[in-house]
Image (spheres, rainbow, N blue to C red):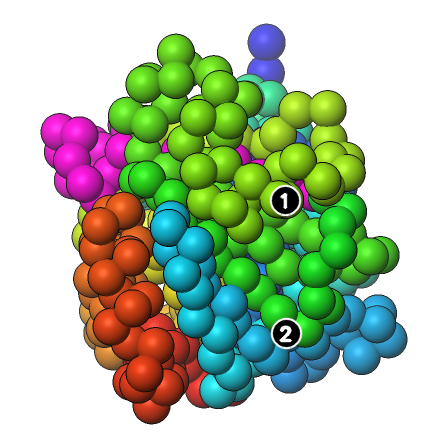
Amino acid sequence: MTTEKSTYDIAIIGGGLAGLALSIQLAKAGHSVVVFEKEKYPFHKVCGEYISLESWNFLEEHGIPLSDWNLPIIKHLFVSAPNGKYLEHDLPLGGFGISRYKLDAALAEIAKSLGVHVMEEVKVNQVNFENKKFIIHTSTSAIYETSIACGTFGKRSNLDIKWKRNFIRQKNNKLNNYIGVKYHIKTDFPDDMIALHNFHHGYCGISRIEEGKYCLCYLTTAKNLQSADNSISVMERNILRRNPYLQKIFSTAEFLYEQPITISQISFAKKNQVQDHVLLIGDAAGMITPLCGNGMSIALHGSKIAFECIRDFLQHKIQRHEMEQDYIDKWNKEFSKRISIGRFIQKFFGSEFLSNLLIRSVKPFPRFVSWLIRKTHGEPF
């Protein structure tokens, strides 16, 4: 049997925010691009679905009509401890709510309209770098040859395992064995607020998205689930609902999914930004803890940084090794401190005792709370 072979300037493995945003920028610059996405649009994925306003202009510039979508603008933060104590604070920059179901599908349509070859329901099985080219093998048996390859496949993929990346090889620890669970719900909650409700070994966020719906998404340890006989409903009943705010949400809200969307083996360990000459972007390059509410903006901003480096390489202004090092340096300059601070804050939010203590301690110091929020966010780009 013969296999199809296609040639492009750039292959992007993963059709989430980082991958689609990068493909749009590259297509506008006149490059041929193929995007591989293992799912079919539109689809749900585990995500807090809150985007910092630092990304608003970037998305509108690339064709997303945010101003026309009547999206909730979120300006206030509410944080509760497991014991019910809480603090409220204005968000210095703020954000907006939108589902990944809506946003990713819209970005995919824009990419297609610009000539990007978006390959849905196609999984990349292998990437080889040979003679200054990438040879990409897919689940369809087709083979692709490209000058540049980018990994935008999210938190964990089969390629991470094949590459034996450091975070994959680490033993289970406090940074790398989390699970995420997401629902869409209807409930009575302020449109302009995002809440983070702490519980034993985890925290749950809630904020409004489009069409009067709310995203309810929580992160917890695999150990919490195991202690509940691997039953999400038992864990929610026995652990999450001990926080009075979560008890109210789970007992009164209308849940719009029959079953939640879940993901396991989430790692916040440090990651490399280039692997075997593949540029890694978004969660594949490094994850900020969800409580910071900045992961989607990091993915989008990371795509802009990668685009600028790739553009210079394809225009023969720099060599491949210079492109790779330039991307690593710029990525770390922009994001590494945010991610480190996020890991530090999560140590408090993951502990019942420490989250109770933190909220009681920082509540009288609003300037310190503002400083913490700013340190996990960037400026408009």
**Is any atom of residue 160 visible in this view?**
no
The amino acid on which the numbered mark 1 sits, given as a three-letter code, is Ile
360 vs 149, left or right, is: left
Q: Which residue in the protein does label 2 denote?
A: 74
Under tag 2, what secondary structure? strand
Under tag 1, what secondary structure? helix
20 vs 166, left or right, is: right
Q: Determine contact: label 2, label 1, CB under 8 Å.
A: no
- At x 70% / y 52%, what residue is drawn? 214
In the depicted structure, whether residue 266 falls above or below residue 213: above
In the depicted structure, whether residue 256 falls above or below residue 270: above
Q: Which residue in the protein does label 1 denote?
A: 249
Write down the region rendered in magenta: 160-184
Residue 47 spot, x, y in % from top left: 54, 48
Let me know if residue 169 is in the magenta part: yes
Residue 50 spot, x, y in % from top left: 58, 63
Nearest to the observer: residue 344 or residue 244: 244
- At x 69% / y 81%, what residue is drawn? 61
